[in-house]
Image (cartoon, rainbow, N blue to C red):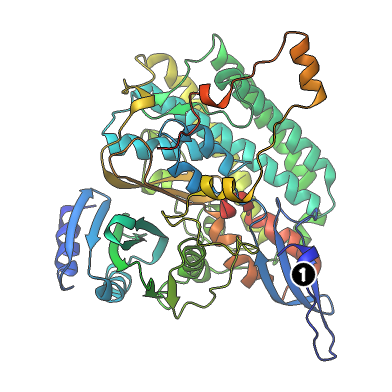
Amino acid sequence: MSQELTHWLDDLLEEIEGIKVRRKSSRRVRADVPADALPALLELLQGRAGYIHLSAISCVDWIEDDEFELVYHVWSYESHSLVSAHIRIAREPGVYLSVYDLYQPAGFFERDIHEMYGIHFEGSPNMEKFILTEWDGPPPMRKEFDSEAYVNEHLNWQEYNPPWLQELIAEGGGVIIPPEEQRFSRKKD
Amino acid sequence: MRPENYEAQRHPPSNEFELNFGPNHPGIEGNYALKVKLHGDVVVEAKADGGYLHRGFEKLMEQRLWIQNIALVPRICVPDPSPMEVCYAMAVEELCGLEVPQRAQWLRVMQLELSRIAAHLFTFGGHAATTGMYSTMYWGVADRDLILDLFEEFTGGRVYSIYNIPGGVRRELPDGFLQRISETLDYIESRLPDYDNLFFKNQVFVKRAKGTGVMSQEQALAWGVTGPNLRATGLAFDVRRDDPYLVYDQLDFEIPTEAHGDAWSRTLVRRLELVESIRILRQVVAALPDIAGPIRAPIPNPLAWNVPAGEVYTRVESSKGELCYFVVSDGGPKPYRVHVRGPSSMHAVQVLEKMSVGSRIEDIAQTMFSLDACPPEVDR
């Protein structure tokens, strides 16, 4: 990206109130904006700066701050640069606006985030379940959902000791590492 | 929704009926389903139904050490696993500020391009099978196996090579490997005319594929389509050239495009990409003997490795399109968040739903294979 274009983008972004722009590399820009300013920022980026490709929407659960972070990654086919717009929304009630009207790929990402984090996007075309069709527990990607605790509570551990393995051990073959000696198994804190 | 739990809806009498296309159907890539509503044999509505391959990778990765995740990521996309490793490793390297040695970067390019050839051959096979040409499928799978033999030799794994670690690659090349890779490339190149005669020039395929599953460039851009599917609409965009990573900016290669945006154009773009991948690999084979040095940068004790806090978005061009990882670290021994943006999450869901409408039931399989949809990377 040329120096001239860089300044042009910086000037453009300054039109948004409360924005903080950080240039991470020649092709990566991070912008932090207040949640209510994001649609205006995306409209500006898409309409006047050529960022027409929504690469992804990522969600991060900052449980200690009681906030969700939503990150909108938009790419420009003209200036070959990627702007990641970060916003924070309150964990409760976890509601935000859909950007489907601006970027159609948002439909998939918003549906996915709704399913995994329970955030509701107002105006999104489809908030139906897609991956976890038969799951009625809490949204599993939230930090408070402990998958190991869920398994211990709802499923029974079974010893796997089929006849062929017993024969193998009787012949002196096979290696069994008890769980407490497994180097990589996750220990409860 | 699993078929056994599916309750048929009662509709007023009409000529329309519903059909579950998948999840176990030879015309569906992987375990995936389309619920279609038909009027005669024309699709009037299609709904994608995923989740059959959901293994919870993103949650699992938050519970494992940075180094352990390397063994996990390739499993996200079964037919093209190598870009997953490289993209994740690049993210960790960027967070840690690790400089990857030149030789490791060239070795990674070699791995990625071999993987691209293997994935494309696999896709041709599947696509040909949807038009009833099973010979191409046998050929494609058999020739892909030669690439897997190479993978086995230089990484130790045929499909999931787990060759990368943050900082570089795990192994040096075996003796005489560059000679063997050249021989395999020569062989695959010599096979291309045979593939052309058997499949790409075959009127059974050409007549079925031309005009099937058409998307214009405006539609492709609006729907977020990337990779060969976007290039088939005439836009020469490739992450390898336009957002370069590794040593792709030092390599000489073309970006093939086609104009029509139909199943025929998409398949042709992949066929042309095989030639470019072979060209890239020849450059790598020629360059590698002169690039000496280590194959990985020193890293801290991987079992007690706290990656500095921060976030990073890395992209690579996989055989299916733009593959991205958004990785967040809170300074701890495990990732705080990893978001995998599989390229198929666009063209296997919303795009497939839109493109199926108006097509005939027998063209759905061909549309899906020509898009090269990969359900495991949608489900993750």
Q: Position of residue A75 (x, y in %)?
A: 35, 59
The residue that label 1 is drawn on is B6
Q: Amino acid at mark 1?
A: Tyr
Q: Quadrant of residue A37?
A: bottom left
* Number of marks present in the image shown: 1
- Residue A37 seen in render: yes
Residues B318 and B169: in front is: B169
Q: Position of residue A124 (x, y in %)?
A: 47, 77
Taking A150 as reference, is A15 left or right?
A: left
For residue B294, above or below residue B226: above
Q: Position of residue B203 (x, y in %)?
A: 81, 55
Farthest bottom residue in view: B12
Residue at mark 1: chain: B
Residues B187 and B157: in front is: B157
User: Of helix, strand and loop, which one carries label 1?
Assistant: loop
Name the residue: 73% across, 69% down: B35
For residue A153, above or below residue B81: below
Please rate how many residues cluster around mark 1, counting C-alpha atoms within 10 Å: few if below 14, some from 14 to 19, many from 20. few
Q: Position of residue B264 (x, y in %)?
A: 68, 57
- Residue B283 seen in render: no
Name the residue: 55% across, 52% down: B228
Q: Quadrant of the N terminus of chain B?
A: bottom right
Name the residue: 29% across, 62% down: A85
Residues A178 and B372: in front is: A178
Name the residue: 59% across, 54% down: B379
